[in-house]
Amino acid sequence: MIHLAEVSEEAGFTHIWVGDSHLIWREAYVNMTAMMLNTTKVKFGTGVTNPLTRHPSVLASAYATLEEYAPGRMIVGIGLGDSSVETMGLKPSTLANFENALAQMRELFAGKEAELPSGKIHLLHPCKGKVPIYIAASGPKMLELSGRIADGIIVLVGVADEYIAHAKDKIAVGAKAAGRRLPDINLVLWVPCAVSDTAPAKDAVKAHVARVVAHPLPYVLDPNEQKVLEEIRKTYDYYHHMDQQANHAEVIPDWLVDKFAIAGTVDQCRAQIERIEKTGIQQIAIIPYSPPGGSREETIRGFAKAMS
């Protein structure tokens, strides 16, 4: 992880998002600390945490501490809970609980008191600077909520123009309700990615595409996509979440990869990037996968080349 962070910063990436799913991946906050101490300017955030396995007060303390080490380099990436809660047999947070948890975190960050059912609490080491909160969203209600309260939004809806447009429409509804403007909200498109000029890169991202397709989405899948979704639901195993070798990868056809991922040669990926940049997305955050016979570093460097 440290090496990949160093490679990412050297290649010109501005942000690194670290997965937080404690039963299937190494501890996110330890990883973030190690990577942050071995880089100088890249920003870090959880990709993403949740308010169930991490109490809002625990998140507030963790980020306030990390912000002391790296002022201006930390971002809270948070969602309702996916593999981290599903592997525990739990359900994702409700929208009401989620909104309340974010309000508590912001109070604690600011050195104010937060109200819990058990009483009022406060943080003795609040943040000296602002730590932005980015919400991961895919479903229509979560996208609207994000438009209303998020500093930035991690959009998980695929890469097709019409999919991104549907998401932006829902975000705009929430933004308008809060007296905000859509252009003032940073939009991060969350994208599984594999880049190789010599190997079939699409195969590497299929397991991740399966999970994106199975998320709540702000649009209706067409009949062919719906058939694939039915197969995903039969095979998906959260203990193999984002595992390239997972069985659920086998049900994903190549044509669906093009709608939900950036995968291919450097030139093919460059064409995808140039198209996405025209949609109003401010940042593309890739989840790098190893093309057959390659490595995640190959994908990181290949994507950086495609961006140049």
Image (cartoon, rainbow, N blue to C red):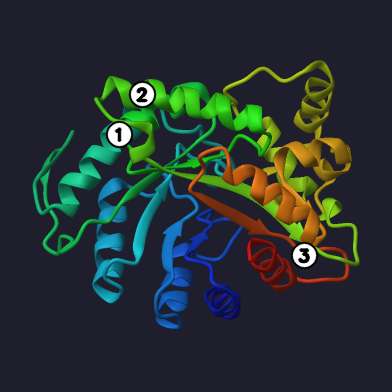
Secondary structure of the residue carrying tag 2 is helix
User: Looking at the image, is mark 3 or mark 2 nearer the viewer?
Assistant: 2
Q: CA distance from mark 3 to mark 2?
A: 37 Å
37 w.r.t. 155: above or below: below
Q: Is residue 114 left or right of residue 254?
A: left
In x, y percent, where is residue 117? 18, 33
**Residue 243 in sight:** no
Callout 1: helix, strand or loop? Answer: helix
Dot 1 crowding, Cα within 10 Å, few <14, some 14–19, many 20+: many
The Cα–Cα distance between marks 3 and 1, rounded to whole angstroms, is 35 Å
Where 184 falls versus 246 (above or below)?
Answer: above
Displayed quadrant of residue 66: bottom left
Which residue: 42% across, 75% down? 36
Q: Could you say which is closer to the camera, residue 53 or residue 293?
A: 293
Residue tagged 1: 149
Q: Quadrant of the N terminus?
A: bottom right
Q: Amino acid at mark 3?
A: Ser
Q: Are circles 2 and 1 on residues that touch, CB within 8 Å? A: yes
Residue 107 in sight: yes
What amino acid does circle 1 point to?
Ile
Instruction: Mark 3 or mark 2: name the one nearer the start of the chain.
Output: 2
Distance, label 2 to label 1, CA atoms, is: 8 Å
The answer to which of 97 and 168 lies nearer the viewer is: 168
Image height of 195 relative to 6, above or below: above
Which of the numbered marks, if any, corresponds to residue 174?
Answer: 2
**Residue indicated by mark 3:** 290
